[in-house]
Image (cartoon, rainbow, N blue to C red):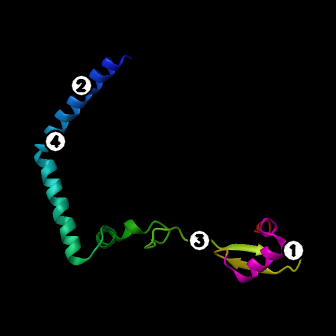
C-alpha cells in the first residue's frame, strides 16, 4: 500500500473514531456513569474504604474463592519438604531462608539439595 493510501485510510478511521467520541460525549447514560463513579470514589475516600472492602461488605460470598485474599495481592507460598538421603533428616519450609537448608546447600550444592524436594 502506498504512503498516500495508508494516510487516507488512517485519516478516515480517525474521523470515524472522532465521530464516535463526540457521540459518546453527548450520551446522557455515560455522563451519569461518570458522575456516579466520581461520587462513589469521593465517598470511599471520605470513609477510608477501598472497593474491595465495599464488595466484601455487600457480597461476602464474592471474596470466598477458596484461597484467602491477602492484602499484598501475592499468592501464599507453598510448603516445600526436603529429605536428606544421607541423614534421613526432613526440613519443611515455605522459603529458602531455612538455616538447615542453607547448610545443606553449602555442603552438597544447591542443585543436589533441590533434587531432594519431595
In front of the other: 17 or 8? 8
- CB under 8 Å between callouts 2 and 1? no
Residue matched to label 2: 12
Instruction: Report how far apart the C-alphas of labels 3 and 2 lie in the structure.
Output: 52 Å
Instruction: Report how far apart the C-alphas of labels 1 and 3 lie in the structure.
Output: 25 Å
Binning the other alpha carbons within 10 Å of mark 2 as few (below 14), some (14 to 19) or many (20 upward) gives few
Residue matched to label 4: 24
**Camera-side mark, 2 or 1:** 2
- CB under 8 Å between callouts 1 and 3? no
Above or below residue 81? Residue 13 is above
Q: Is residue 83 visible?
A: no
Q: Earlier in the sequence, mark 2 or mark 1?
A: 2
**Camera-side mark, 4 or 2:** 2
Q: Quadrant of the C terminus?
A: bottom right
In front of the other: 96 or 63? 96
Residue shown at 30% from the left, 71% from the top: 50
In the image, is 105 to the left or to the right of 86? left
Instruction: Report how far apart the C-alphas of labels 2 and 1 lie in the structure.
Output: 71 Å
Q: Earlier in the sequence, mark 3 or mark 2?
A: 2
Q: Quadrant of the N terminus?
A: top left
* Quadrant position of residue 33: bottom left
Q: Position of residue 79 (x, y in %)?
A: 65, 73
What residue range appears in magenta? 97-113
Label 2: element kind: helix
Residue 103 belongs to magenta span? yes
Instruction: Report how far apart the C-alphas of labels 4 and 3 lie in the structure.
Output: 46 Å
Residue shown at 85% from the left, 79% from the top: 88
Q: Position of residue 52 (x, y in %)?
A: 34, 68
- CB under 8 Å between callouts 4 and 3? no
Above or below residue 50? Residue 22 is above
The label number, if any, that marks residue 85 in the structure image: 1
Residue extending farthest bottom: 99
Amino acid at each position: 500500500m502506498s504512503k498516500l493510501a495508508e494516510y487516507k485510510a488512517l485519516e478516515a478511521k480517525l474521523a470515524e473514531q472522532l465521530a464516535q467520541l463526540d457521540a459518546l460525549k453527548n450520551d446522557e447514560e455515560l455522563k451519569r456513569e461518570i458522575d456516579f463513579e466520581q461520587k462513589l470514589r469521593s465517598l470511599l475516600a471520605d470513609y477510608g474504604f477501598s472497593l474491595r472492602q465495599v464488595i466484601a461488605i455487600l457480597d461476602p460470598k464474592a471474596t470466598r474463592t477458596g484461597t484467602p485474599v491477602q492484602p499484598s495481592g501475592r499468592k501464599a507460598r507453598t510448603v516445600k519438604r526436603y529429605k536428606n538421603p544421607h541423614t534421613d533428616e526432613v526440613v519443611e519450609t515455605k522459603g529458602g531462608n531455612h538455616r538447615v537448608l542453607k547448610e545443606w546447600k553449602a555442603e552438597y550444592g544447591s542443585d543436589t539439595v533441590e533434587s531432594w524436594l519431595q
